[in-house]
Amino acid sequence: MSLRDKVPVGVDDPKDIMENGREAWRLLGILSEFVEGAERLSPIHPAVSMFGSARLAPEHPYYQLAERIARKLSDAGFAVISGGGPGIMEAANKGAFFGRSPSVGLNIQLPHEQHANPYQDVSQTFRHFFARKYMFVRFASAYVVMPGGFGTLDELLEVMTLIQTGKSRRIPVILVHRPFWQGFLDWLEAKLAGEGMIDPEDLQIAQVIDDPDAIVAAIFKHYETRGFEPLPHERQLMLQL
């Protein structure tokens, strides 16, 4: 018997039918997260997505630096989008909340760590990481990445991969605090570029800037000849994220 002659087992089993129905409802729930998130965020631009550790207290220097950067961005006219939780996410929202532009929190339901911080003008909660990650990229004119853990690295490598593969428009990706990131950057250069896993020019996707004023200036410089709105070909790219 060939594979094409085989009949799937249990296709008419009532348990399978019920499970398929539940899966369809799950997919509709995921779709609703995309629709609702896009509707909430589409009027908010330009915006900068900020990332960093959820585990840092307000007394930590990284927290305080993130708050200063977010306040500078907000006063310069950028909405600030964070993951909506504690730590550096809270610092980003807090800085923007007391600035001129909106503070946006994209919260995620997790069994531990995540709780919504109180510094959000716009708050949206997600159950699925990938719907939330789409919003970070789709509505950001720049990424500012503070020191953080797995989640921070996930967001950073996600946007770098999208830019590298041409699935997203090129936006400023700014790493903050060189002493934290230098070992990672050295590894990318020595191992990924050095062993031919990426092209050397891919290392230019991200840049390190530690001064808050210089971060704002770098973002403005990137857009000074074109404006913040996506160009026509970039709009097409963003439809394929």
Image (spheres, rainbow, N blue to C red):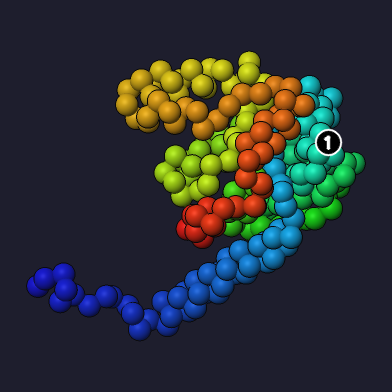
Front residue of 47/151: it is 47
Can residue 183 be seen?
Answer: yes
Q: Secondary structure at mark 1?
A: helix
Q: Quick check: 48 left or right of 164?
A: right
Query: In x, y percent, where is residue 98?
Result: 90, 41
- Determine the residue positioned at 78% across, 31% down: 69
User: Which of the image's four quarters has the N terminus?
Assistant: bottom left
Front residue of 169/10: it is 169
- Determine the residue positioned at 22% across, 77% down: 7
Query: In x, y percent, where is residue 229?
Result: 64, 52
Badge 1: few (under 14), some or many (20 or more) residues near its Cα, within 10 Å? many
Give above or below for 219 relative to 79: above
- Determine the residue positioned at 83% across, 36% down: 71
Query: In x, y percent, where is residue 151?
Result: 60, 39
Q: Which residue is mark 1?
A: 71
Query: In x, y percent, where is residue 239?
Result: 51, 60
- Determine the residue positioned at 52% across, 22% down: 184
Front residue of 97/42: it is 42
- Specify the farthest residue to the front: 225
Can residue 146 be seen?
Answer: no
Q: Quick check: 65 left or right of 231?
A: right
* Residue 142 figure quarter: top right
Amino acid type indicated by mark 1: Arg
- Specify the farthest residue to the right: 98
Q: Quick check: 213 left or right of 108?
A: right
Give above or below for 211 relative to 216: above
Q: Quick check: 110 left or right of 157?
A: right
